[in-house]
Image: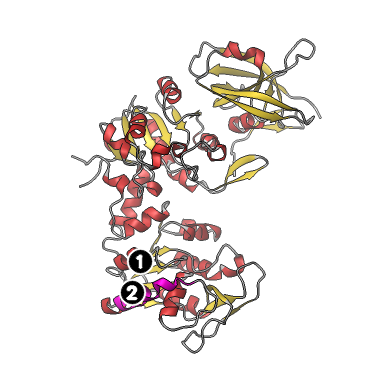
Amino acid sequence: MGRIVTPVKIENLLDPSKKIEIDALVDTGAYMMTLPTAWRDRLGNFPSSRKIELHLANEETVEGEVCGPVYIQIPGFHRIASEVLFVEMKPANGEYEPLIGYITLEQSQAAVDMVGHRLAHVHHVDLK
Amino acid sequence: MAKLSLRDLDVRGRRVLMRVDFNVPVETRGGKIRVTDDTRIRESLTSINYLREHGAKTILMSHFGRPKGKRVEKYSLRPIGEYLHSLIHHPVIFSHDTIGDVPKKIIDHMGSGDVALLENLRFQPGEEANDPEFAKALAELGDLYVNDAFGAAHRAHASTVGVTKFVPKSAMGFLMEKELKHLKEGLEKPAKPFVVILGGAKVSDKIGVLKALMEKADTILIGGAMANTFLKAQGIPVGASRVESDKVDLARELLDLAKNKGVKFLLPIDVVEAEEIRAGADMRNTSRLSPQHGITDGWQAVDIGAATIALYQEEIANAETILWNGPMGVFEIPEFGEGTIAIAEAMAQSGATTIIGGGDSVTAVKQAGLADKITFISTGGGASLELLEGKALPGVAALSDRE
């Protein structure tokens, strides 16, 4: 299975000067837009945050912090108002690998095109 | 006196706090909460889109489930906000808190046309208690208030009644207007013959509405478990069927009242009886019911029978106005749903004005794929019954009068 990496722009909804533009890995097994805790300050202060427990594929349980609200935009798709999840990440080859999870994909109306190895726009989303 | 409407308000650039009814059925699939019937969300789009097109900052608030005054994550409105985004194609900013600094900061940063959704009102004990402090805290989030939650208008809660005391103007949304137009104005002088179909479990839930509708209806058709209480009042054996024994005398009084008013009050002349209420249980159509031939001992009525369906279809075919509330049997189990579906089909085929007053009959009509053939389907079960009973809805009464 191939990897799909796409640019994403994330902006603190209450402080538009606090924004990041990154490349993130599309991971349909991830819950939401997931960033390394080390980047938390780059997005400024959030009025809302809560701690959650995450169960990883290796059966490990880690704590994460959901913060928001933020605007998230994948180029070519709807800009969405959502939240981001910060977790402790270990850099691979000196770089972090942020993840775009399924909540972000659904809201952005983006589907994974496994043949073209890209994100494709879904014109009609039936979440039912 | 007529109430102010959303179209009477100058909303441009204003913070409009709108009560909606997003208490929709959901299921958890793949670890995610999915909306299974989005009717109430879609019905509120007319008001939401109007506000967006007219440059308002729209702040939506709703209840969802029964969290009983505390935060219960499965009742968070977050997934509903995500769903709304997919319908309006515009970001819906979700506020994790219902009142206080979080929504205030979010609203301060909203632009004209933006939409925010507050967390579940019922996470706060002040909502159902109609606490003035909570109502005031809600009111601080808006310059104007709109109530579009018909399904919650029969409740005097902080977000439906209390809040109106702390805002300069409060108005009806378009869904609220539509519901009142069909259920109140439309049934004030219905075209005759006016046929009312009432079903559901309990007579006690429908006493008020039965009495009120006897003033207007030409014919009342009874089905569902409530029919058993009437059958018992006529001395017909009802086997192990669900009966409200303490309401048998009342049922007799209602039968007499209908007779005195000249209302044709029809009960099932036969039923489908089953050994137990479960899919696959032994079932059969009874012969014509009478004090000598009732429902078999130990068996239960689960649907109206074939002869009753034919009788009711004939009444429906001759009607000019039809109002239906409550299923004819245990329609959740397909084998026991034939009577309910037959009524839905007869209504869809009639040339009459057809109105469905909320509740399970709405689900039945949708399951049968007939919703678009019904003149009006209400989004409120309890609220529509109270309105039909002639009661004033607190959530409407509290709104500003039109000058």
Q: Quadrant of residue B314?
A: bottom left
**Mark 1 touching mark 2, by CB under 8 A?**
yes
* Residue A42 in picture, x, y percent from top left: 59, 11
Q: Which residue is drawn at the image coordinates 44% and 30% (left, top)?
A: B115
In the image, the segment drawn in magenta is: B243-258
Name the chief secondary structure element in magenta. Answer: helix
Task: Give the camera-side residue of A113 and B103.
Answer: B103
Residue A70 left/right relative to B157: right
Task: Give the camera-side residue of A25 and B298.
Answer: B298
Inspect the image, locate mark 1, and give the three-letter code of the amino acid beneath it. Ile
Q: Is residue B378 above or below residue B20?
A: below
Task: Give the camera-side residue of B395 and B306.
Answer: B395
Q: Which residue is drawn at the image coordinates 34% and 32% (left, top)?
A: B133
Q: Which residue is drawn at the image coordinates 24% and 39% (left, top)?
A: B400
Q: Which residue is mark 2?
A: B254
Label 1 sits on a secondary structure element that is helix
- Is B252 included in the stretch rendered in magenta? yes
Q: Quadrant of residue A33?
A: top right
Q: Which callout, 1 or 2, points at the residue further toward the start of the chain?
A: 1
Q: How many residues crowd mark 2 within 10 Å: few (<14), some (14–19), many (20+)? A: some
Q: Which residue is mark 1?
A: B207
Q: Chain letter of disc 1?
A: B
* Residue B168 in picture, x, y percent from top left: 25, 31
Q: Chain letter of disc 2?
A: B
Q: Is residue B295 above or below residue A13?
A: below
In three-dimensional space, the C-alpha distance between marks 1 and 2, rounded to whole angstroms, equals 8 Å
- Is B195 included in the stretch rendered in magenta? no
Residue furthest to the front in view is B246
